[in-house]
């Protein structure tokens, strides 16, 4: 377990959240590198031609797992045309069962790089262990930390030095202060480019795969200066409600989405039930335009622009 007190803290006296809720000050002020203060500007994670956490709502989309060249290229071209800016796809999969598809590894990373060349999309992919960080960082534009790895502190330390932005998913049983603690661990190791991701948590409810904690978005935006995105796919577990959860994320002020899309979800090797097909994704992107345009948060004068030029 990573203890913030072991690190040099700068004494956060003006944690922004104290104005909204004194309890949040207690809970979050220890994480001084990632907490929102009056002095600290919002973090905007910049990739070539793309800014996450600024005025744009950024959609990251693609298959749960990279399965084949054909599957990945078909998905990449379709999501790019529909307005996504980042291609997702797992090359290393953390599966609950040891007998399930574990991913294509380096071959998958090479396919992602090929898809980036072909479409201009940036690449996000998951890294499971510290030993793989250098290799994944050679190919990925954003390093994804999965829900099962949020508290893998040796992985977080390695990501602090990887030279790439990190998307940190909330652990499925983690509180928001624990998510912030993990973000602090990455930042304390030298990497300020962190994106937080709400992907649903375990509750007593079983009708959905996880319970999307939509309130996490405004809370995290209040207590942290980091961008916050939502993964509606792993929260839902079923594709029919993914577009509705995506709307909620847009309206509540998220900085973007991470969505699973597959050309033939019935045949997907993982997470097919929650993956949108290519038409459903295009429809969702069209639908989202009007919800994103009503979004504004206290920090921004205007509303977020939907950078989905492909969508009409
Ligand atoms: C994924 O994005 O495919 C994934 C494994 O997500 P999570 O870590 O949220 O389960
Ligand atoms: Mn998945």
Image (cartoon, rainbow, N blue to C red):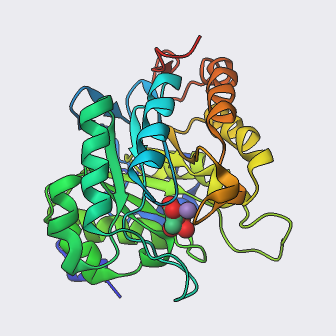
- Picture quarter with the N terminus: bottom left
Residue 213 lies, in percent from the top left, at: 68, 58
* Residue 109 against residue 239 in the figure, above or below: below
Q: Residue at x 57, y 51 (%)?
A: 231
Instruction: Report the side of 108 relative to 278 (left or right).
Output: left
Q: Quadrant of ligand 2?
A: bottom right
* Residue 103 against residue 229 in the figure, above or below: below
Q: Residue furthest top?
A: 312
* Residue 40 against residue 144 in the figure, above or below: above
Q: Residue at x 29, y 32 (%)?
A: 118
- Picture quarter with the C terminus: top right
Q: Foreground residue, 123 or 150?
A: 123
Q: Residue at x 71, y 45 (%)?
A: 242
Res. 9 in view: no
Give the number of marks.
0
Residue 277 lies, in percent from the top left, at: 65, 41
* Residue 230 against residue 175 in the figure, above or below: above
Q: Residue furthest front?
A: 70
Locate residue 273: give its quadrant: bottom right
Q: Foreground residue, 149 or 113?
A: 113
Res. 81 in view: yes
Residue 259 lies, in percent from the top left, at: 56, 46
Residue 96 lies, in percent from the top left, at: 57, 83
Instruction: Report the side of 203 relative to 140 (left or right).
Output: right
């Amino acid at each position: 377990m990573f203890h913030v007190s072991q690190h040099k803290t700068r004494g956060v006296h003006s944690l922004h959240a104290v104005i909204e809720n004194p309890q949040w000050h207690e809970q979050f002020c220890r994480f001084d590198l990632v907490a929102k203060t009056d002095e600290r500007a919002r973090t905007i994670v910049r990739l070539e031609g793309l800014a996450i956490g600024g005025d744009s709502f950024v959609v990251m989309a693609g298959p749960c797992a990279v399965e084949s060249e054909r599957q990945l290229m078909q998905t990449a071209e379709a999501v790019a045309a529909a307005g996504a800016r980042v291609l997702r796809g797992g090359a290393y999969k953390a599966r609950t069962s040891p007998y399930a598809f574990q991913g294509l590894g380096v071959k998958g990373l090479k396919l992602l790089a090929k898809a980036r060349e072909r479409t201009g999309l940036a690449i996000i992919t998951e890294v499971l262990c510290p030993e793989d960080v250098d290799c994944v960082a050679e190919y990925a534009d954003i390093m994804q930390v999965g829900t099962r790895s949020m508290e893998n502190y040796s992985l977080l330390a390695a990501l602090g030095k990887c030279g790439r932005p990190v998307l940190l998913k909330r652990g499925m049983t983690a509180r928001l202060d624990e998510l912030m603690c993990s973000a602090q661990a990455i930042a304390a190791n030298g990497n300020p480019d962190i994106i937080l991701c709400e992907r649903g948590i375990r509750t007593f409810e079983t009708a959905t795969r996880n319970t999307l904690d939509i309130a996490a978005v405004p809370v995290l935006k209040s207590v942290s200066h980091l961008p916050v995105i939502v993964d509606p796919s792993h929260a839902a577990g079923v594709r029919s409600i993914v577009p509705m959860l995506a709307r909620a994320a847009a309206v509540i002020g998220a900085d973007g989405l991470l969505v699973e899309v597959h050309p033939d979800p019935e045949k997907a090797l993982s997470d097919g039930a929650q993956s949108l097909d290519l038409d459903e994704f295009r429809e969702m992107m069209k639908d989202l335009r009007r919800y994103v345009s009503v979004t504004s948060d206290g920090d921004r004068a205007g509303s977020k622009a939907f950078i989905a030029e492909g969508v009409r």
